[in-house]
Image (cartoon, grey):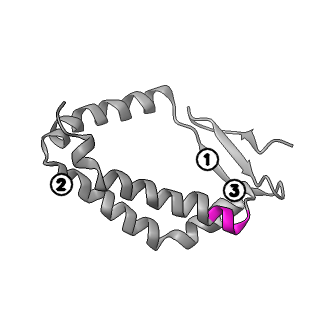
Amino acid sequence: MALFEPIESTGPRRKLRLRSPATLEPIGEIECGTREDVAAAVERARKAQAGWGALPVEERAKPMWRLLDLYIDAQDEIIAKVIEETGKPRNEAIGMEVFAGCDSISYYAKNARKFLAPE
């Protein structure tokens, strides 16, 4: 049995039912974006980039620090969802999803000035 399977959809977006790899029990459904959805998201990002790029590096790093706080606050939910969706043991979910995620976020926030410096 597949970990995801198509289900009937009434609109232009495909829907998939997700199954736990550990138990094969249904764990949720997702709706896939269309090419138009992706094109619209890219267009919004391109429009936002000019204003974002004009901000000082410290201002651009602030959302990363806020993300880190949110990530830490939600770590129990993240761990539970990773275990449910992947079947990973708790220690692996903590190490690979929470610790590694927090480490990556703080690394880029700390090094933003160096990474974004003109060459």
- Tell me residue 27's x, y (percent): 72, 58
Q: CA distance from mark 1 to mark 3?
A: 13 Å
* Left or right of 50 in this view: 28: right
What is the three-letter code of the residue carrying label 2? Glu
Foreground mark, 1 or 3, reads 3
- Tell me residue 58's x, y (percent): 18, 54
Q: Residue at x 37, y 59 (%)?
A: 106
What is the three-letter code of the residue carrying label 3? Glu
- Tell me residue 51's x, y (percent): 15, 40
Q: CA distance from mark 3 to mark 2?
A: 35 Å
* Left or right of 20 in this view: 68: left
**What secondary structure is marked by label 1?**
strand
Q: Residue at x 67, y 68 (%)?
A: 91
Q: Earlier in the sequence, mark 1 or mark 3?
A: 1
Residue named by callout 2: 59
What is the three-letter code of the residue carrying label 1? Ile
Tag 1: Cα neighbours inside 10 Å, few (<14), some, or many (≥20)? Answer: some
Task: Tell me the tag on residue 96.
Answer: none
Q: Earlier in the sequence, mark 2 or mark 1?
A: 1
Residue named by callout 3: 85
Task: Out of 1 and 13, give the one closest to the viewer.
Answer: 1
Q: In the image, which residues are magenta?
A: 89-93
Magenta stretch, overall SS: helix
- Tell me residue 95's x, y (percent): 60, 63
The tally of labels here is 3
Q: Residue at x 87, y 43 (%)?
A: 1
Task: Out of 116 and 9, give the one closest to the viewer.
Answer: 116
Q: Residue at x 13, y 46 (%)?
A: 55
Q: Quadrant of residue 107?
A: bottom left
Residue named by callout 1: 30
